[in-house]
Image (cartoon, rainbow, N blue to C red):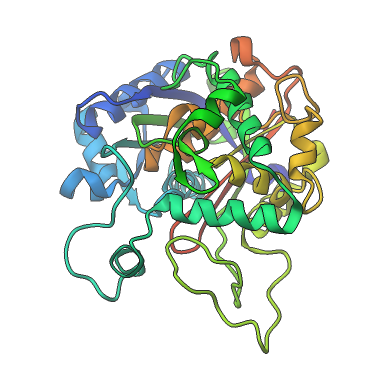
Amino acid sequence: MNGRDGDVAVLGAGMHPWGKWGRGFVEYGRVAARAALDDAGLSWTEVDSVVGADTVRGGYPGYVSGATFAQALGWQGATVTSVYAACAAGAQAIGAARAQILAGLAEVALVVGADAAPKGFFAPARGERPDDPDWLRFRVLGATNPAYFGLFARRRMARYGDTVEDFAQVKVKNAAAGSNNPHARYRTPVSAAEVAASPVVADPLRLLDICATSDGAAALVLCSMRYARRRGVTDPVRIRAVSTVTPTYPRAVLDLPDIATDSAATVEPAVPGFRSSIAAAAYEEAGLGPRDLSLAEVYDLSTALELEWYEDLGLCAPGEGAALLRSGATTLGGRIPVNPSGGLSSFGEAVPAQAIAQVCEATWQLRGTAGPRQVAGARAAITANQGLFGHGSAVVTIR
């Protein structure tokens, strides 16, 4: 399916601010859901379906987040779905809600993701699980997420000549955007000198090159185009594509949580690679390409990874991400602003919420209501991230 036949309307978007609040994920999700419903002008009882993006840190309620959020809002008979795909859980939840609407199984769906993250770096779930690659990389290598971020950065430096100064400028750009976002956790502009002065975490990356872990939540109210028209909304923001593709064998670039790659001795790696294929599938379904975009929200777990996404999204050729950044094209006011929300650099990771939060930002940008961080004349946006174990995540929104 592509084009208008696959459109669903975004009636409402809402968030709970990111931070370290010391409360439970259910409270954050309820706040975001209520904000999205208020934005849509709907009551909770008008929702047909609730799709929750799961968090493994919330105990059993976190694993059944669709029902957890439905109960928190007050049982009213809506169908529920719960989705876990690590950092791609939010996009999977959006995709599930969209599929239900397009199949005629629901007219109004509420999508919610929320997390209460631990202090410090993420660790695997507890217990002895030698068949779990995520558990193994901690037990065998002691490799936290930043170890992989550092490897990506070193790879870019070796292949393309990127520098630590290039990485720092990504943080400077995103911190400037995040300073204008009331939902962001970090709202203070940062200089390149401050990035350089922050402690080394995973050489060559410093503390300010790497996103934090955060509490937060995001929610969307999606509906059929027919329902939107009945509500008098004739020109809504529309979701035109959702890509949740998996990698293609052989996978020759090391990625979380693996500690080895497939052999490419007899089979050539697929072209495009995994992250590029996520965007390519979204573009194909939407009938759009990189030149049609007004902005992009990408998964900046580290500053170096943001530069990689420029290339994966086709905003520039491979190896030209740093040059695109230096040109000013990806800043507010540039040709293709990237992370006008401030990105994870300004928010931190609230894992099941972040892909939903990206679409919230795209919605506000396409409506023209993003305030000081508004991208002028925004008409089309792409969001992109990925989750552990080969979960792709990209959403194309248009207006």
Decide: is 284 above or below 295. below
Residue situated in front as seen by the camera: 393 or 30: 393
Decide: is 307 above or below 71. below
Decide: is 99 above or below 296. below
Residue 172: where, in percent of width, then height? 61, 25
Q: How many marks?
A: 0
x 59%, y 15%: residue: 370
Q: Is residue 283 left or right of residue 232?
A: right
Residue situated in front as seen by the camera: 196 or 103: 196
Quarter residue 221 falls in:
top left
Residue situated in front as seen by the camera: 287 or 323: 323
Q: Is residue 80 left or right of residue 301?
A: left
Residue 294: where, in percent of width, then height? 74, 30
**Quarter of the C terminus within the rendering:** top right
x 33%, y 61%: residue: 142
Quarter residue 240 falls in:
top right
Residue 107: where, in percent of width, then height? 46, 37
Among all residues in the image, which is located at the extreme bottom? 266
Among all residues in the image, which is located at the extreme top? 372
Q: Is residue 10 visible?
A: no
Decide: is 88 above or below 14. below
**Quarter of the N terminus within the rendering:** bottom right
Q: Is residue 264 left or right of residue 16?
A: right
Residue 224: where, in percent of width, then height? 54, 36
